[in-house]
């Protein structure tokens, strides 16, 4: 899904997502993982067993630089995607609001595990709102 979305981005045909798009979601996971790694190595460096350990210090420093790069890539991705969809995603990251969903937009519903489009469901067989399972 992430690679398919990346191909769509490069082709200029990526659909608008109401939440994180697949690349943005992967970036969020990478950022949280780097925060965890940074915290872990920072804590390890304060313990008796690893205080002054050059390897822990090098790993901590590498994670910090990687995290800086990830943040820059995340903001750049938000600017590029926002321009492509004519919305300010950097501002949306700050205040948490995006313009309302429109027909053709994709809204991921994690608790139900299916993707629905703004105007209708994707017709997943297990989806309670799918036209194939909906009762009149």
Image: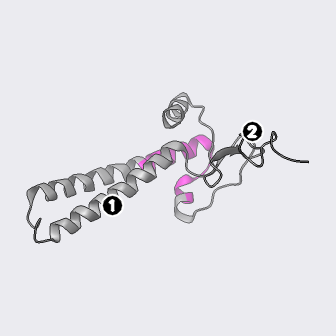
Q: Main secondary structure of the magenta part?
A: helix
Which residue is more in the foreground, 129 or 55? 129
Is 15 in front, or is 128?
128
Q: Which mark is residue 113?
A: none
SS assignment at label 2: loop
Asked whether residue 131 is in view, the answer is yes
Residue shown at the point (36%, 55%) measured from the top left: 33
Q: Is residue 43 above or below residue 58?
A: below
Q: Residue at x 50, y 37 (%)?
A: 2
- The reply to whether residue 106 is visible in this rendering is no
Q: CA distance from mark 1 to mark 2?
A: 38 Å
Q: Is residue 36 left or right of residue 42?
A: right
Q: Residues within 10 Å of mark 2 (few under 14, many from 20)?
A: some
Q: Furthest-right residue in view?
A: 136
Which residue position is annotated with label 1?
36
Could you tell me residue 54's position as x and y percent? 9, 57
In the image, is 47 to the left or to the right of 119? left
Q: Which residue is mark 2?
A: 123
The part of the chain drawn in magenta is 74-92
- Outermost residue toward the top? 11
Query: In the image, residue 12 lies at what x, y percent?
Result: 57, 31
Look at the picture and state if 73 lies above or below 47. Answer: above
Residue depicted at x 26% and y 54% = 63
Q: Is residue 25 magenta?
A: no
């Amino acid at each position: 899904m992430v690679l398919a979305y990346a191909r769509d981005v490069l082709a200029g045909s990526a659909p608008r997502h109401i939440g994180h798009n697949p690349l943005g979601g992967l970036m969020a996971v990478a950022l949280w993982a780097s925060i965890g790694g940074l915290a872990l190595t920072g804590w390890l460096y304060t313990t008796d067993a690893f205080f002054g350990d050059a390897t822990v210090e090098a790993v901590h420093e590498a994670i910090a630089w990687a995290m800086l790069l990830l943040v820059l890539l995340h903001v750049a991705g938000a600017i590029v995607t926002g321009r492509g969809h004519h919305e300010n995603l950097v501002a949306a990251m700050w205040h948490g609001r995006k313009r309302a969903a429109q027909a053709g937009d994709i809204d991921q519903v994690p608790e139900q595990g299916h993707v629905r489009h703004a105007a209708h469901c994707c017709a997943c067989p297990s989806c309670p709102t799918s036209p194939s399972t909906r009762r009149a």
